Amino acid sequence: MQPELTSDQEMIIEQVEHFVKGQITAQARTWSHQEESAHDGLSSLGEQGLLGCRIPEKDGGPELDPVVLCRCLSAIAQADASLTVMAAMINGLAVEYLLQHDKTEHRSQRLEALTGGQEWAAWVSPDLTPSSHGKPAILAQPQEKGWSLDGEARFVT
């Protein structure tokens, strides 16, 4: 069953499809041939507002419907799967986490940097063993420019 979309939603999806075909597809070919990461495409997606799709209007975002977000991600996937995963992680995890949990005065700056493609978010899956007594095996320490991870982890995404 396909949900019925409004004309505004259809227009947004068409604009994203046009952008992806005109910008991302050509870049994705270059990344593939040169064996580079698609992370360069994040700034392009950020400029188009595609990294903060679910941010509420009161926080300066477009507050797109989840169906529209999925259709936009699907359009990006036509060009580059890895870029789609990064965009989905930013939209679905990082932005949602900041919206739910960041109550500091820096929240809007963090959202802007993240959704503009200038900063990254990381998720760490630490190895918790019975000998760790519930303490994480990895610690994030703020640095002058960013963060450092200290310890061991099986996965950092």
Image: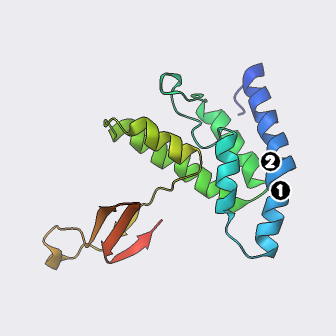
Left or right, 129 with respect to 9, comes to: left
How many other residues sit within 10 Å of disc 1, few (<14), some (14-19) or many (≥20)? some
- Residue at 78% across, 20% down: 7
Q: Nearer the viewer, residue 15 or 109?
A: 109
| Residue hosting label 1 | 25
What amino acid is found at the position of numbered circle 1 in the picture?
Answer: Thr
Q: Are marks 1 and 2 in contact (CB under 8 Å)?
A: yes
Quarter of the view holding residue 28: bottom right
Q: Which mark is residue 11?
A: none
What amino acid is found at the position of numbered circle 2 in the picture?
Answer: Val
Q: Nearer the viewer, residue 141 or 55?
A: 141
Q: Nearer the viewer, residue 67 or 29?
A: 29
Quarter of the view holding residue 116: top right
Q: Nearer the viewer, residue 155 or 143?
A: 143
| Residue hosting label 2 | 20
- Residue at 44% across, 43% down: 110
* Earlier sequence position, callout 1 versus callout 2: 2
* Residue 107 appears in view: yes
